[in-house]
């Protein structure tokens, strides 16, 4: 069986990565197609992930990024891999995440073309 490639609608969120206003917790909030999205940075890498936790709706922009590079929900402490969305603290939830690209033309988030 052949796997189909995902098709993304790329949206520019900033002219340069330095234009994104990251908080002291290394998480910023941006908006794509009317949807709030978090952008996290860790060890020189950047990630786009859901604004709210899939467990109880905690605001992930109010959480933190731990020493392992996982975003931690401020409500119940659930931890997620920002690149894959996998719940690494064992509760079984999956965090919505999107590809982020930094190009000469700016910073872009790839939204699934089928859902936009």
Image: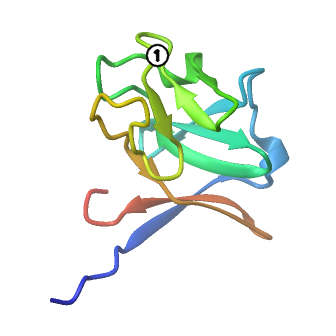
Q: Residue at x 41, y 69 (%)?
A: 8
Percent coordinates x, y for residue 45 in the rendering: 72, 52
Going by the image, does 113 lie left or right of 49?
A: left
Q: Residue at x 29, y 23 (%)?
A: 55
Tell me if residue 95 comes above or below residue 11 in the rendering.
Answer: above
Q: Name the quarter where the N terminus is drawn.
A: bottom left
Q: Residue furthest bottom?
A: 2
Q: Name the quarter where the C terminus is drawn.
A: bottom left
Q: How many marks?
A: 1
Pick whichever, 30 or 85, lies toward us: 85
Pick whichever, 21 or 80, lies toward us: 80
Q: Residue furthest right?
A: 18
Q: Residue at x 78, y 46 (%)?
A: 43
Secondary element at image label 1:
loop
Going by the image, does 45 lie left or right of 94?
A: right
Q: Residue at x 26, y 65 (%)?
A: 114
Q: Residue furthest top?
A: 75
Going by the image, does 68 lie left or right of 86?
A: right
Tell me if residue 22 comes above or below residue 58 in the rendering.
Answer: below
Percent coordinates x, y for residue 3 in the rendering: 25, 83
Going by the image, does 108 lie left or right of 102?
A: left
Colour scheme of this structure image?
A: rainbow
Percent coordinates x, y for residue 67 in the rendering: 70, 31
Picture quarter containing residue 112? bottom left
Q: Residue furthest front?
A: 90
At label 1, counting other C-alpha atoms closer than 10 Å, the crowd grade (few under 14, some 14-19, many 20 or more) is few
What residue is disc 1 on? 77
């Amino acid at each position: 069986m052949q796997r189909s490639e995902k098709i993304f609608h790329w949206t520019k969120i900033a002219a340069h990565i330095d234009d994104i206003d990251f908080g002291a917790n290394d998480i910023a909030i941006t908006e794509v197609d009317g949807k709030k999205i978090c952008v996290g940075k860790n060890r020189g890498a950047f990630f786009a992930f859901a604004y709210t936790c899939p467990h109880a709706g905690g605001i992930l922009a109010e959480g933190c990024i731990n020493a392992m590079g996982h975003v931690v929900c401020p409500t119940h402490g659930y931890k997620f891999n920002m690149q894959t969305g996998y719940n690494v603290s064992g509760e079984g939830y999956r965090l919505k995440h999107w590809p982020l690209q930094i190009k000469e033309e700016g910073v872009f988030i790839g939204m699934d073309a089928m859902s936009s």
